[in-house]
Image (spheres, rainbow, N blue to C red):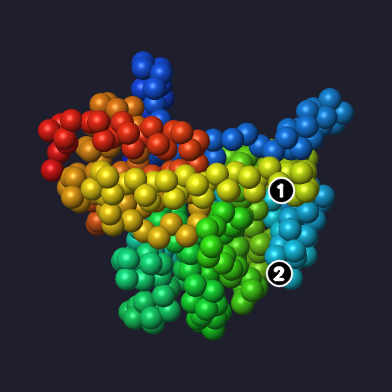
Amino acid sequence: MPSVSRRGQQVTPFQVMEVIKAAEQRRASHGDALWLCAGQPSTPAPRAVRDAAAEALQSQVLGYTPAVGIRELREAIAEHHRRGGLAVEADGVMVTTGSSGGFTALFLAAFNPGDTVVMARPGYPAYRNTLQTLGCEVLELDCGPEVRHQPTVAMLEALPTIPAGVVVASPSNPTGTIIDADELAAIATWCAERDVLLVSDEIYHGISFGRECTSAWQTSHEAVVIGSFSKYFSMTGWRLGWMLLPRALRRPVELISGNLSICPPALGQVAAVAAFGDDARRELDAHVARYAVNRQLLLDRLPELGITRIAPGDGAFYLWCDVSELTDDSARWCEQALAATGVAMTPGIDFDAVHGHRHVRLCFAGTTAEMDEAVDRLLAWDPSTRPG
């Protein structure tokens, strides 16, 4: 029997994938699963992207591309950021195999085993799990509602030592909260002045509800900005993301990425150029308008379930809900709710190992009818079956 490394034995599960597996089983057995668990759009890629992919399949070889991505897509991404007010050139853009592939290559290039990297709690678990697997020490800042579940410069100033890196996400997964523009600028300045690498996860830009999204590159080009086609662009399974990289990191990340995956998927790269066209934008903005309706519906109806403490949900398509009035074991509660009602929700333990047992994350990227039906089913669920 082959041996498994200590690193392989210690990888922490990404619990939402277990929920997705259970929801798939419910779909197969009952056909009635409502997906409020997976953090992805319920819509396909824009028609222009699908048309471009169909044409490329017929007319192009679609072989290996440069590890950094095809030039046409890098130029399109740079122009996308320039329209948003950033000074970005194509040479500073690297296309990646999803944002996840970008994070892994970046962490390998930027951090050494034993380095301390700071992130918020609650936060996206794959940051923590990947960094720990690579031998880094992860320091989580307890970011409660009083700071809108986002880190602050005051928290960084209070650290016992200067870390090697800081990871922020705005809008955040799981809370949907957006860092104030002044605070993000202050964090970027604090990091730049101390040679701390700021990694700014901006993959949910484009999805916000009345609150401004700003970029770390508006303040410091020594930060790394992570982008993705998965969320606003509705291309989750296409596995395409990108990074804006400081000059010193471009070649190391390119070399590591070339060894890890050779290149991002060629078909997706060719097709994704069309995602920045006007027709695609109109289609995608219509999705965001639906997300806004779904968000408000849940905010209006969740109090019927006794859920009243909810993070602001400024952007992305999540609500981070305190369910301590219903349970002190959100994993068990979500499991029982799925079995009883077919409503699949993500327990907070994925995102917060300290307080997550009292929280759930709801994704409202589905249809409005599905959101309404989910609340109806949970209301009809016999309260005596609920733990807590």
Q: Earlier in the sequence, mark 1 or mark 2?
A: 2
* Residue 386 visible in the picture: yes
Q: Quadrant of residue 22?
A: top left
* Quadrant of image for the N terminus: top left
Query: What amino acid is labelled 2 in the image?
Result: Leu
Q: Give the SS element for disc 2.
A: loop
Q: Is residue 256 visible?
A: no
Which residue is painted at 44% across and 61% down in the image? 177
Rendered view: 104 above or below 169: above
Judge left or right: residue 217 versus residue 146.
right
Determine which of the numbered discs, if any, sits on residue 281 in the image: 1
**Which class describes the residues within 10 Å of circle 1: few (<14), some (14-19), or many (20+)?**
some
In the image, taking residue 207 as reference, residue 302 lies left or right, namely left
326 and 139: which one is in front? 326
* 207 with respect to 352 (left or right): right
Residue 125 picture location, percent across and down: 40, 51
Number of the label disc, if any, that sits on residue 86: 2
Residue 228 x/y as whole percent:
61, 50
Q: Position of residue 294 (x, y in %)?
A: 47, 44
Percent position of residue 327, x then y? 18, 45
